[in-house]
Image (cartoon, rainbow, N blue to C red):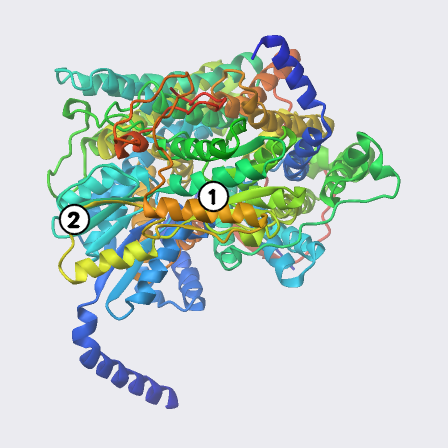
Amino acid sequence: MQLVLERRAERSTLIAVTSPLIAVALTIVTFSVLFAIMGKNPIEALYIYFIEPLTDPFSLQEIAVKATPLVMIAVGLALCYIANIWNIGAEGQFLVGAVCGSWLAVRTNGTDAGYWVLPAMLILGALGGAIYGLIPALCRVYFGASEILTSLMLVYVASLGMDYMVRGPWRDPQGLNFPTTAAFDPVASVPTLLEGTGRLHAGSIIALVVVMLVAVLLGRTIMGFEIRLVGAAPRAARFSGFSSDRLVLFTFAVSGALAGLAGIIEVAGPIGHLDPGVASGYGFTAIIVAFLGRLNPVGILVAGLFLALTFIGGEGAQISMKVPLDLTKVFQGILLFYVLACDSLIIYRIRLLRTVRKPVHAHG
Amino acid sequence: MPMVDALIEIFKLIFSVSFILTVITASTPLLLAASGELMVERAGVLNLGIEGMMIMGAACGFAGAYMSGSTLIGALCGILAGAALSAVFAILTLGLAVNQVAAGLALTILGVGLSGLIGAGFVGEQIVPVPHLQLPVLTDLPFIGRIVFGEDPFVYVSIALIIAIWLFLYRTRTGLVLRAIGDNHASAHALGYPVLRIRLLAVLFGGACAGLAGAYLPLAYTPFFIPGMTSGRGWIALALVVFASWRPARLVIGAYLFGAVSILGLALQPLQLGIPQQVMNMLPYLATVIVLVLISRTRGTAGSAAPASLGLVFVPDR
Amino acid sequence: MKKWNVVAVAALLALAAATFGGAYAADKLKVGFVYVGPIGDLGYTYQHELGRQALQKALNDKVETTFLENVPEGADAERAIEQLARAGNKLIFTTSFGFMDATLKVANKYPNVFFEHATGFKRAKNLATYAARFYEGRYIQGQIAGKMTKSGVIGYIVSFPIPEVISGINATMLGAQSVNPNVKFKIIWVNSWFDPGKEADAAKALIDQGADILTQHTDSPAAMQIAEQRGIRAFGQSSDMIKFGPHAQLTADTDYWGNYYIGRAKLVLEGKWKSDDTWDGLDKGMVVMAPYTNMPDDVKEMAMKTEAAIKSGSLHPFKCPITDQDGKTVECKGGSRLDNGQILSMNWYVKGIDDKVPGK
């Protein structure tokens, strides 16, 4: 007797709809057991992780603030991953975007510059990220070098480069020589939306717009069709005359731009200045969000919000239940596992088979 | 410092016994982890969870060694931890045909988190590091004595391992089958080869190697445990497999090159060469990209050397 | 059935405790801590955590402490601090420089909560700053190193070029020069507060380049272990690392925050808290030298004398005149010594150091 995986004749819509719920349910069960083993009250823990952050406006806004860069980056990454192009360097593109945009903020700091500053910063950030993202793309197109390796290595280069800038030329003159730029002027800052009640800022609106634009790109443009085709049937795509080189450059440029945009928004918004602490691993967390959202822009929006919820719930749990931060990581890992497993059941089903000697014959 | 003097100093540095010894210890965990991943990827599976398996190996390895007093038991614990975590990965990717990139990332977060929970109780403790080899006449030979005959067991295991992997892949039938599976799992399956079973074994092997690599850090390198002590080495190991074009000999070169440049980035700083320290610290990463680009150029447009089925989902037809 | 009896009794007891201890429990002062690293780092964050534990122990019936660890210094910091404020913490310590702006923002939003930011310089009515005069301990270490080194080369493993680290290097050098004018430093920047592997590699490289005493401004005990292995001496950093270097550790300039935390909590309890800038050192016990070990008696005596002199104020590590790396005499704004501002913003080296301040 053995368990085998068998491809379904067609996707199961039932599972497609319920799989995230099943995954969450399974995670909750696993977690309750874990919590019980650790001697904590599982019901209380689940409440603090999932429900409590939803109960007041402050944490709701914080969820949006945390999710904004994740969703923006993840949407760009989805474009790459659908086409089996593995951009692992979003963190580096995020940082370069932050640095490029910050350059303008630092240059105009203290001067009487007008409202053009912020939009210009955003454009610079996106451009910077796009150019940085093109480096691994060019290495792949012209040298056949793996983009996994190049994009990853460039993350370290970017973070050390930013470190150099912030400690040197861009140091805040009033900052007692500490490695931070001066706080950005108001014209160089992303405005908050609900002044006084929380940190929700215009970046979240931009993120929503980005989600919609990418959804349109994927669903209704030739380029989007190309991306989806290359991912699903590479040979067919080649025969259709689509250039995979062009695709590599395009997807890296777009995802780099989005990551760079997320970077400058984060720096000009919630943080308000540039310092080495800006590198928080968003580029890597976004990869998880991309997969949790099944590489679909709307799914990514939901997944980003959900993951942000678990981060904030995790902090709450640290405060009220003295639960270590590592537990939140374990939780996220297990959640991702269950989501992936349940999603697999959309396309496949599990069957119990009597073991038969596998006949050796060629399949058509 | 004038150019000529600087070059002489660098030369003296690179060819000193202690520099070479330090490079060997820095490169060994990379080589161990990357060797395992090489086997996994040659079989067509991409396991991005090396960092998670390594840090679990570090936590469990230290815990095991601390509680038993034996570094051998610690190493075994590390191996088991890595293999166990990779088994979870195998269930998902081989059993349920889940996307490998996503599963690998999930493995990383899970491993990092779990290792923190497990290792938390051992922070602040230290153990006696694993002893180095000590042969009567050989270890005392000038220059090569300690380098060749005075290393710790992990170093010898890492060399033996990569040689064994090479022999396995290129000189045994099963190795041939494994490579065939990595290149075209559909054809391999059609020919009746047990694709999933071989992949499973490869994945477990990779997990064991990653666990051992992780255990090296608190058992030999710095004999204590701190959460996160792998500091991204798992990702470097991943990159090294790609850098090596999935070939064992190149992997050894890559691991030692990276280790050497990393140490140089530190050791050259006091020589005051006028290069900012951030650039010095960047060197290993830049060097890897540049060398990779140079190697790839010579292959021209022959395409990637990756096993063609790498990362692709395989579900056997019935 | 038995189980329910136990539950009932427990509930009754809890109720009793609540009514009797209720008035007391409801008044417990909630104190929050925000850490940038893990409490297991055996270094900087670990020492803050020890301080928190000391506070909890000393005022256990009046105070309830909480902490958040591994809080990144980016956008998450503000939320973490605010969450502590919203959870009812009335005194919040943010323990890393990078939390400065975030703490200020939250302090402005919660005027009734008291905030204290470590190693920063922005203050408000409800935001105080505090730091330890690490450089005092460094000066003593410098003197010990100057006396004990045979090769004349001291190895220095450092993290990032912030003023605190630079003033540490300078203080060590000034201390060393006071007993050994020709001593030399070899400095390696590892770009991390702790990365045990890298610190070990740096230690080995420094020893290979002739250093026979190691000191560090990074958090893990890796370098100390290497020193022990190679039979040389080293100084611990932030925490007492004697365990990792029983024959190697000369001393360590440990941060001791416990007294400060207990003192500040008491001020809140008495209603006397006000924003301040505390920068204490050996005299107030914020910097504590680990026991002097592995050194000859005369060196130990010298160290203890210097320590006493610094405590009494008769010796200041940055007493003028001080010459910088380029040979110019540094302007002395504090009378006979550098003033606080100069030390806090130090980004230049004293004469005798062969390194360039990165990023200058």
Would residue A50 be seen by someone viewing this image from the given angle? no
Residue receiving disc 1: C219
Q: Position of residue C237 (x, y in %)?
A: 47, 44
Looking at this rendering, what residue extends furthest in the right direction?
B137
Q: Is residue C114 left or right of residue C311?
A: left
Subunit bearing disc 1: C
Disc 2 target residue: A57
For the residues marked 1 and 2, what is the alpha-carbon distance in whole angstroms?
39 Å
Residue A110 visible within the image: yes
Q: Is residue A120 above or below residue A31?
A: above
Is C177 on the left-hand or right-hand side of B152?
Answer: left
| Quarter of the figure with the N terminus of chain A | bottom right
Mark linked to residue C23:
none
Does residue C246 sit above or below A234 in this rendering? below
Q: Secondary structure at mark 2?
A: helix
Question: What's under tag 2, amino acid-wise?
Answer: Pro
Q: Position of residue B78 (x, y in %)?
A: 63, 52
